[in-house]
Image (spheres, rainbow, N blue to C red):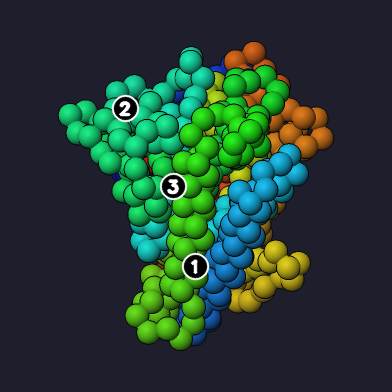
Amino acid sequence: MIRMPLASASLLAIAIALAGCGEDKAPATQAAAPAATESAAPAAAKVDEAAAKAVVNHYADLALAVFSDAASTGKALQTAIDALLADPSEATLKAAREAWLAARVPYMQSEVFRFGNPVVDEWEGQLNAWPLDEGLIDYVADDYQHALGNPGAQANIIANTEIQVGEDKLDVSEITGELLASLNELGGSEANVATGYHAIEFLLWGQDLNGTNPGAGERPYTDYVVGEGATGGHNERRRAFLKAATDLLVSDLNDMVEQWKDGVEGNYRSELVADSAENGLRKMLFGMGSLSLGELAGERMKVALEANSTEDEHDCFSDNTHNSHFYNGKGIRNVYLGEYKKVDGSTLTGPSLSELVAKADAQADATLKTDLQETEAKLQALVDSAEKNNVHFDQLIAADNAEGQQLVRDAIAALVKQTGAIEQAAGKLGISDLNPDTADHEF
């Protein structure tokens, strides 16, 4: 993706304009923000090297904690799915769904570590790729809308031991994690996703056929029954697919934990802490800004809002998108404040970016903390809409829901505004060319 510099002052102006936008759709294109002038660039204070090193090392501690929680909740999901497969019932399916939802909480807070850390970004696609053409995996409705030109969009691995992709025939008779991983981006289409949280989500919930009306997927537990009472067809293969995808997810999560352990020669953490403190701080701030701007405000919210598209909703089968977005935002705040609330209820704290920025410029720190708090409030409004009013993200983006769309616009505007504050804070630490990833979006 092309990374385009965005001036902090311009980001703020754009955020204000976006927040006040009253049309049914956000504008598709806007002029690119002008570059900041040299005179407007924030003055940088000398950053204490030892203090900066301590912040980077604590950043690695945060990563280890959040990935460890993602791994432990992934293991709990695996246990719940094993129970579902051992005794399919309404109760075991409900428990598996609840375990999936719980596993998303730490994982979504880990995504701030993607940008700037190649070991995470190169690994992430196998765990969280989306949107996906679910027809690659299993049965779908007759009016199923898939990505145009996708040769694997209706392959239905579960129903077939051999699938045709263009001129090629592929043997998929034995469903293993290795096979599923090899089918990701089959035929060159990014919509072909056979692994990760969203493949598992689809197998637990099934398609959400409600469009922008209330309701999530309603796959029956009988799709996992073998023998009398079974529904869906090819249930042994569906069971094998769910088991293989889940086991691979757990293995992948465990692998990432190893990358962040302290004192392990040759793992990613050892490289990060051996590098200069400035590069470490840049990775931290770049990750915050890129998740905030291009990924969350752009790919996960703006795209779905502008197209009124439930196909571009992040956790579309389970209607969990509000929580997905909220915990992405929480992850950004975690990195800046140097804190993370673990799944066991304890809180990890330590040397923070906030402390470094405050020493350089107390006002820049206060501004960013205020913006992070405001963003969390706007994302909380999406959570409240879903959990208190039963109006989920897919309903908020409906073409005729002006009030709901405004909630989403407000969250996007807050994310854009806080990205400007992240760039300002970076400048105070001597990082004047942060250039957070826009994912080719203009705001």
Other residues around mark 1 within 10 Å, as few (<14) / some (14–19) / many (≥20): some
**Considering the image in quadrants, where does the N terminus appear?**
top left
Q: In the drawing, does residue 115 fall left or right of residue 378?
A: left
Q: What element does badge 1 sit on?
A: helix
**Which of the two residues, 73 or 386, is positioned nearer the viewer here?**
73
* Circle number at residue 423: none
* Residue occupied by mark 3: 195
Q: Is residue 386 above or below residue 212?
A: below
Q: Is residue 103 above or below residue 59?
A: above
Going by the numbered disc 3, the residue's amino acid type is Thr
Across and down, in percent, residue 328 comes to 58, 50
**Which of the two residues, 105 or 224, is positioned nearer the viewer here?**
224
Q: Please report whichever mark, 2 or 3, sits nearer to the chain's N-terminal start.
A: 2
Across and down, in percent, residue 292 comes to 52, 47
Other residues around mark 2 within 10 Å, as few (<14) / some (14–19) / many (≥20): many
**Which of the two residues, 121 or 43, is positioned nearer the viewer here?**
121
Q: What element does badge 2 sit on?
A: loop
* Residue occupied by mark 1: 254
Across and down, in percent, residue 195 comes to 44, 47
**CA separation, marks 1 and 3?**
16 Å
